[in-house]
Amino acid sequence: MTLSLGVLLLLGLCQSTISEEPSSSPNSTNDGLKFQLPTPTYETKDDYTPRSIGNLFKMVRIFLYVVQPNFFPKDLVRKVLQKKFELSMDYGKPESVVLTLQVIQYEIGILFGVVLGLLFVILMPLVGLCFGLCRCFNKCGGEMHQRQTRDGPFRRKYYALALLILCVLMSIGIIYGFMANRYLRTHIRKARKLADSNFRDLRTLQNVTVLQIHYVLDQYNTTKEKAISDLDNIKTLLGGNIQEHVKLKTIPVLDDVEAMAEEIRDSKVLLVSVNKNLWELKKSPEEIYRGLREVKRDLEQSLKDPVCSEPAQHARCNSIRMSLDQLDNNTYLGQLRLLDNEINNVNGVLQTNLSSLVQMSYQSINNIPERLQKQTTEIIPAVKRTLNYIGLNIKMIAEKVPIQEKLSVFLDSINDLESNIYRELPRVEKYESYRWLSCLIICCFLTLIMIFYYLGLLCGVFGYKQNATPTTRGCISNTGGTFLMVGVGVSFFFCWISMLFVVLTFVIGVNMEKLVCEPYQNRKLFQIMDTPYLLNENWKYYLSGKILNNMDINLTIEQVYRDCKDNKGIYTALQLENVYNVSKHLTVEEHIRYMNNEFKKMSVNLDDIVLKEEGKRNLLDFSDSGVEQIDYDTYLAETGKSLTKVNLLTYASGLKEHANKLPPGVLKESLTRNVIKIKDIHNIKFLPLELQLKELHHQIQELQQRGSGLKVKVTNILEALDSSQKFITNDLPSIIIEESKEYADIIISYFEYYLNWAKITVMEEIAACKPVATAFDSAFDVFLCNYITKPMNLFWFGIGKATILLLPAIIIAVKLAKYYRRMDSEDVYEDDENIAMKKMYRSASNPL
């Protein structure tokens, strides 16, 4: 009956739990997209492990393997179930007889135990009746006379110790019975809480499934918003990438052109400054040279003074005369050509604003994103319309997936099942009270027997006096023997009832453990239920016929349970792809191809980015302006000289020394006068012109540096411009196509990612049916096996052991009572023999 109810519960839950599908991508990201499917938290644990009493359950299970060592008979159970479903079965047929013999062969260990138990139940009352009648006639130990033997004290000790050991073993069995009875009652009371948590979990599964479906649909809007954001930002994403490629090829050469434009302007300024300084220096030195020539002529006339004829001054006058050549001209700046032609050429170059042309190119590059956005105004709306259409398709697909329909059936079935369980729970609890009371009475009766035996042993051992004869034994010892006989009487009266209860629980418990609990744990029970045509003779596979309306699909209860145990979604567990294939319908290849075609239409014209031809001609004109062809060596050679051959101050100092050594006269006055003139020329005229000459020299050096390799520089720039133009003309279109494809792939990848995530989520995550497997486990493994079967087996194991041990305990207690009870008569011996007998008795009669 229990097995049938369990099977019906399993099938009912399987039928009602048609929800949806699993997936295994809880957290996934794609360029900012992150989807986190709502996952519930369930109350019921998916496993159950008994605590300290679990070791006792294992001990009983080992004993069950001794009683029933056979493996689960799948084929035999299939045949039995098939025969049972055939109402017109003829039990006289040979195959029925063979089937019956196979059942008996499998149950031989249990049947042997049942036969022994029934023999115990039948024989123990008869033996007790006969034993009582026999004692009434002073037989079977009923005569109150004890013969004294040499081994009497040893037997008394042996019987007492044996009975004590038996009582301890029986007490352990009774304790097992009390523990099992309490465990069973306590956990039966938890059945309502267990059912509540399972039903709450199942409703949570139903509620969260609706939320999960809505979440999956809502994530399309998130994906679409991400794609639309990228479409609206096309000028940055696509235009920016194209702009970077263009900048990489054009900005360096444009920077060189900009630098060359600056060079032209600086060169013009420098040419004008050189030309001005050169023009000024062509005239100004003549004044210095004129003054020095006058000084030279004056000194030449003065040296004709008679003083020079004197021997003492002759050498000095010759020295002065010979130094006069140092006052001649040292430079010939007037021979240098002015740079008017070069200046005119550069001015002609500057008629074209090269910097403006470069800025126009810069501006064109900077405007690439805006130009691209303007040139794709028709493509973006078309792609957005496609995205909206995809969203409508996904909603239609979601409506066709049979999730909501199955969930409504599931909820109705859960409500019916819950109401039935709660309606039957009071009756179960009522019958459980009867069972608990019956088991308690049995344990109490056995405990009462143990109390009698313990009291008998206690009084007999401690009340026994070694000097007392059988007729003179004390009251305490006699009371101990009486307790033992009372225990024997109660044992005969009650043990058959206890054994009858043990037999009943033994048969039920062993078969439940071997035919339900073990097969459920190793999944063989599901294999029986999955037998083709077993539950419905017209359906090969019951679940597929009941759920999918296609009985040929291999949908088994074992597979459903295994998938749910692994927390897979119901779409996968129940193979709902046979009802509606999400993978087949949840595809947008056609729309993706359309979007790709739209993006391929993208065309961006960027031919006018590089410098215009006018700018290139301007560069060529500058290279031909003559700045590079100036004879810089001549200019530098002349401007590098000093205006005079000698340092005028040094020369004036030498003249002054000569003058100081001359006697007063015309020559000395002339030398002194000319020293003053030379110093004035140096300070007033020479120093400014010398500084201007040095400045001119530096300017010519700078101009030479600027003009050096000018043609090569311009040629390199023009070649770089041609290379950039070739890049714009030949390579950039393919780059634009490649970047456009990459940009389109990013947009499309959002939806491919979403669709893949949605497929996996629907098939593997939505409505993950672990609560269903947990409900099965709660019904079978927890409630039926751990709450009922295992404590039931522990109960009959403990009580059965105690009951069986009552048989040797009765025999030993009857024999031991003879040594504790006061006898009416005893053996009488002659004095010598009596004295020897008493000594022997005293030496061997120490209390146990």
Image: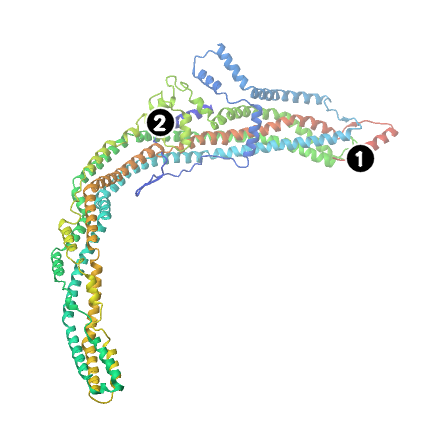
Q: Quadrant of the C terminus?
A: top right
> Residue 204, percent across and down?
37, 36
* Secondary structure found at label 1: loop
> To which quarter of the image does residue 307 belong?
bottom left
Instruction: Answer few, some or many: residues within 10 Å of disc 2's Cα (few below 14, many 20 plus, some between 14 and 19).
Output: many
| Viewer can see residue 92 | no
Quarter where residue 665 is shown: bottom left
Nearer to the camera, 81 or 481? 81
Which residue is rendered at x = 23% and y = 85% of the image?
Answer: 308
Residue 303 rendering spot, x and y as whole percentages = 20, 83
Which residue is most to the bottom?
Answer: 664
- Residue found 23% across the figure and 78% down from its top: 322
Residue type at the position of mark 2: Gln
Say left or right for 179 vs 229: right
Q: Amino acid at mark 1?
A: Asn
* Image quarter of residue 424: top left
Residue 402: x, y in percent? Answer: 30, 29
User: In terms of secondary structure, where does tag 2 sit?
Assistant: loop
In this view, the residue in front, 452 or 76, is 76
- Callout 1 crowding tier (Cα within 10 Å): few <14, some 14–19, many ≥20: some
Q: How is the image coloured?
A: rainbow
Which residue is tagged 2? Answer: 575
Q: CA distance from mark 1 to mark 2?
A: 89 Å
- Tag 2 or tag 1, which sits nearer the N-term? 1
Whether residue 812 is situated above or below residue 382 in the rendered picture: above
Question: In the figure, is residue 202 to the left or right of 50?
Answer: left
Against 44, residue 279 (above or below) is below
* Residue depicted at x 17% and y 68%: 333
- The residue under label 1 is 467
Q: Nearer the viewer, residue 673 or 121?
A: 673
Q: What residue do we see at 21% from left, 52% from top?
A: 712
Q: Position of residue 78 (x, y in %)?
A: 46, 19
